[in-house]
Every structure is written in C-alpha cells, then in structure tokens.
Amino acid sequence: MRVIKAKSYQDLSRKAANIISAQVILKPNCVLGLATGNTPLGTYRQLADWYRKDDIDFSQVTTFNLDEYVGLAPDDPQSYHSYMRRNLFDMVNLRPEACHIPDGCAADLSAACRDYDAAIAQAGGIDLQLLGIGSNGHIAFNEPGAAFEKDTHVVTLRESTLRANSSFFSDGCVPRQAITMGIRLIMQARKILLIAEGPGKRNALHRALYGSISAEVPASILQLHPDLTVICHVEEDT
Ligand code: PGA
C-alpha cells in the first residue's frame, strides 16, 4: 500500500488524474473502474482539461462505474449516468458504448447484476479502479456489515449514506436502494486508487488503512489488495 498525502484538494485531484493518465498511456485499451460523489470531481476536471490539451486519448478505453441508484432512469439528472456524462463522458473522447454503469431501472435487477459482472469479465477485468470512501467506511455502496464475497448486487442504503448524498438531490430524497459492485469484484481490480478528501473522512480512512480488517469497515479489506494507492487530504487546513 502506498499512502500519498496531498497538499490540497487540487493537489489530490492532479495526482489522481496523473495516475489514471499514466494507466491510459501505458495501456491505451485499458479498463477503468470509475466512481461518483464529490471527491472525484476535481480528478475528472483535470482529465478533461488534459484531453482538451491533447495530452490524453480515451478512444480505446472501456469504463465500468461502481454503482447506480435503483429506480433512477439514465436521463434523470440525479442519476449517476447523468453525473458521469456531465463530469467526464461528454468532456472526453470515450466511446458511449464503452462506458458502462449498472442499470438501476432494469425490470430484473438480479439479471442486470449478473450481466454487469459478465460484461466486466468479458472486457478482461478492471485494470485500475478509482474509489472514494464513505465517512462510515463504505466503498461504493457496500455499507458496514456488507459481505466481502459479493459481486454486483442490490443494496439498501444506510441512513448516514442517505444523509451524505442528499445534497445531490434537489428535494433531499435519495433513493433507498442501489446496485453496486461488491467487494469481491472491487478487490479483483489489478490496481486500486483510493481518494479521500476532507477531515470528515480522516477517521474512516485511518480505520480502513490501519485498523483490523472487518466488515464493519468495508474499506479495511483494501489492506489485502496487492496494488493499492491512497491519495488523501484529510487534515484540517491551517
Ligand atoms: P464523496 O463520497 O466523494 O461524495 O465524499 C464518497 C463515498 O461515499 O464513497
């Protein structure tokens, strides 16, 4: 595990974008696992900026997002489909057919989960997975107590996660269920890049990286990943 302390959110974002960019340069047809939330926004802005400057080419890249809310259509402005289009997909030359996000509106959610796992396997697995961490230690929507051995599945969200994500919803009403990649699937990524921003993440990050490995802190399993890089900016700014 490598832990890199960033000087600022901008520094964190540039460092994370640099690692993603290096992955794309080294393997132009790589498979990226992508995350949503507040933390990756600066990373995506930086990648879009480098794309505009002709410094990075996504034309052969395939992506798989971690999760999506159940019941939100892809064109719902509050869906993760919309978030990804707004913040990355529409800003760079990723091929739309190469960008995958779980289908939260599928009539058969279990079949949608199985199809998602199959599509990742078909693409050859994930080369680099970008991850955030919840202040309760969750990764993707794998909440405390989640089983480590799951692939893509449907989850019911915890109150703390609903509260944390309510700022993204104009009416404050966050869907209560989501489809998420499970921890086993996340752990199969060849490399993992975890980014954590803000003092609110300090405790969860510390428990994840240095505490005992326990389902109560889902991110703690990352200690066992053979190629984990953490970029964090979690101290109070002085
Ligand atoms: P955030 O979410 O980037 O919005 O803080 C991260 C997470 O909950 O996984």
Image (spheres, rainbow, N blue to C red):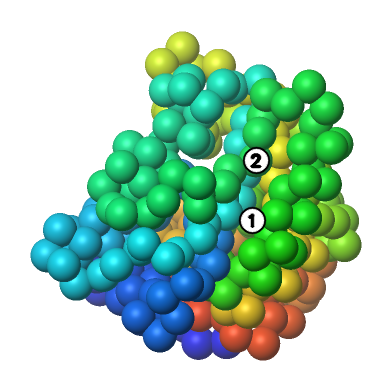
77 w.r.t. 194: above or below: above
Which residue is rendered at x = 85% and y = 56% of the image? 150
Q: Is residue 195 visible?
A: no
Residue 85 position, x and y percent, is: 38, 39
The response on whether ligand 1 sits within 8 Å of label 2 is no
Check residue 37 in the rendering and tell me which mark sits there, or answer none: none
Label 2 and label 1: CA atoms lie apart by: 16 Å
Task: Name the residue carrying label 1.
Answer: 139
Q: Is residue 63 visible?
A: yes
Q: Is residue 14 left or right of residue 206?
A: left
Which residue is rendered at x = 50% and y = 87% of the image? 2
The response on whether ligand 1 sits within 8 Å of label 1 is yes
Three-letter amino acid code of the residue under disc 1: Ile
Residue 144 position, x and y percent, is: 76, 51
CB atoms of marks 2 and 1 within 8 Å: no
Check residue 102 in the rendering and tell me which mark sits there, or answer none: 2
Which residue is rendered at x = 50% and y = 72% of the image? 30
Other-residue count near label 2 (Cα within 10 Å), few / some / many at <14 / 14–19 / ≥20: many
Residue furthest to the left in view is 53
Three-letter amino acid code of the residue under disc 2: Pro
Other-residue count near label 1 (Cα within 10 Å), few / some / many at <14 / 14–19 / ≥20: many
Question: What is the quadrant of the N terminus in the image?
Answer: bottom right
Residue 228 position, x and y percent, is: 57, 80
Circle 2 or circle 1, nearest the eye:
2
Residue 231 position, x and y percent, is: 42, 73
The part of the image, by quadrant, that contains residue 107 is top right
Which residue is rendered at x = 42% and y = 66% of the image? 60
Observer-nearest residue: 54 or 207?
54
At numbered mark 2, what does the secondary structure look like: helix, strand or loop? loop
Looking at marks 2 and 1 on the same chain, the residue that comes earlier in the sequence is marked by 2
200 w.r.t. 193: above or below: above
101 w.r.t. 200: above or below: above
